[in-house]
Amino acid sequence: MATRQTQFLARSLLTPAVGLLFIWMIVPLALTIYFSTLRYSLLDPGSEEFVGLDNFRYFLTDPAFLASLQNTLVLVGSVLALTILLGIPLALLLDQPVIGRNIVRLMVIAPFFVMPTVSALVWKNLLMHPVSGLFAWLASLVGLTPIDWFNDVPLFSVILIVAWQWLPFATLILLTALQSLDEEQKEAAEMDGASAVSTFIYITLPHLARPITVVILIETIFLLTVFAEIFVTTGGGPGLQTTNIAFLIYSQALIQFDVGSASAGGLVAVVIANIVAFFLVRIVGRNLEA
Amino acid sequence: MARMATTRRVAVSTIAAWLCGFLIFFPILWMVLASFKTELEAFAVPPSFLFFHWTTENYATVQERSDYFHHALNSIIIAGGSTLIALLIAIPAAWSMAFSPTKRTKDILLWMLSTKMMPPVGVLVPIYLIFKTVGLLDSRIGLVFILCLGNLPIVIWMLFTYFKEIPRDILEAARMDGATVGRELVYVLTPMAIPGLASTLLLNLILAWNEAFWTLNLSTSNAAPLTVFIASYSSPEGLFWAKLSAASTLAIAPILVLGWFSQKQLVRGLTFGAVK
């Protein structure tokens, strides 16, 4: 009797959350699917008509799509590579006996808490400005020609900013994982005469495999939809050089007011994200068993 | 001999770590310094590092000219409101899954996680049109609602992992003593869950405060939080660097402090318990 009551209570406590998330997931998605089959422009309301898969054909064959897909992949790939390749040595360093480690930790983690619009604008103006930015001054000190970051290497500039924001995340997670590494195992390896390098390769790195995977998957999910950094720095340009999928869909929807095509693009983004999500959910799910 | 080697090792790693930390932190430091310069000095080449005319006038101007506190208040209401509502919905759900798990609990949790994987841009169009139709564009309520739903999966997950760590024996003891479910929740579980609740609250506040996709797309002025207000400085004028820096410093200072307190929970919350 009591258990049945408890079960009923448990279920009714769970229902609001499940219901809300279900609506949140299903209603907009259903609308996106519906809109993606219409010719629908906000500039010309009332003229909606069913066009089947035309929007997809239009979106997928649009040269802007291929360009933005490529930019998205380059952005995600570069930021992942930078944050992990810099994050591993940084985490190893912070795992060493360091005087004032807590303060260093605070400095390293800080960029993660800076809102994207602030980091993007501070980098764009104070650091990367071709005349008055600090980088330009540094370049002139060593006799180099200052780079006009957002004109010469726009995508790379965005990558630098986003990597700066995500490096703390990767470092912090890898550091947390390092600190749970069994010290005895490392000491035993050292006793057996293993060099620092082989200890790293055979003990530390395998231990980091899972956290690295987690970092890759979680960062990918967020990096696939980088938006604010592009919005305030380049607006997708020059040309399409910094337009990623998220920004392309935004500009089709809210600048060109082409609801149908933007919806088709939105579904493409959902499919790409789902491929990543599939793997992440499996890893997290496995952890749930333990 | 060994001691000397250790001392040297500590010295080397200390210097290297401080150098890295300083480099990573530098853009923030540089911004804070610029906020105390005059516009001319902020823009000057070569830049001055410490020996400039320190002034706080930018902070005053930012408020006077742009109604800074209006946007700060929006940020507080949107981040705070969405976090509180998410907690109210999530606490019962996480409690129920942690203490009365069924066969489907794992599936439900993973399904909730998967809703967080949906790229917001995939549903931008319908959300924008719904908001437009019902008049929620540029409204705080609309943003509270969206950010609350967006972060709900993370909140439930975090709470779930914390609740699961509360020893069940205590519950059984309370039940033996004849405590009802309601009393169990109020007198036994809540006190034990407070640390977890606090960290969840903190992390979610940070995420909501910094959220810059929905806020940029769904608000312009009335409901615009600080993310949107700062974005309004993106016009190419170089002459507002000091003011941009002052506004930015104010916008990130509170969250930086909160963030530093919650760094341990951050890992757990953002990896859905996969790394602790």
Image: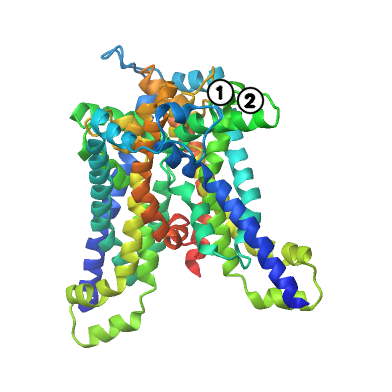
- Eyeballing the image, is B172 above or below A229? below
Q: Secondary structure at mark 1?
A: loop
Q: Position of residue A192 (x, y in %)?
A: 80, 77
Q: Choose between A154 and B41: the one closer to the eye.
A: B41
Kindly indicate whether the residues beneath marks 1 and 2 are on one polypeptide chain.
yes
| Residue A13 placement, left or right of B263 | left
- Kindly identify which residue carries mark 2: A146
Q: CA distance from mark 1 to mark 2?
A: 8 Å
Are dots 1 and 2 in contact, CB under 8 Å?
yes
Q: Residue at x 57, y 64 (%)?
A: A177
Q: Choose between B269 and B97: the one closer to the eye.
A: B269
Q: Residue at x 22, y 67 (%)?
A: A8
Q: Residue at x 24, y 54 (%)?
A: B84
Q: Earlier in the sequence, mark 1 or mark 2?
A: 1
Determine which quarter of the picture holds residue B92: bottom left
- Kindly identify which residue carries mark 1: A131
Chain ID, mark 1: A
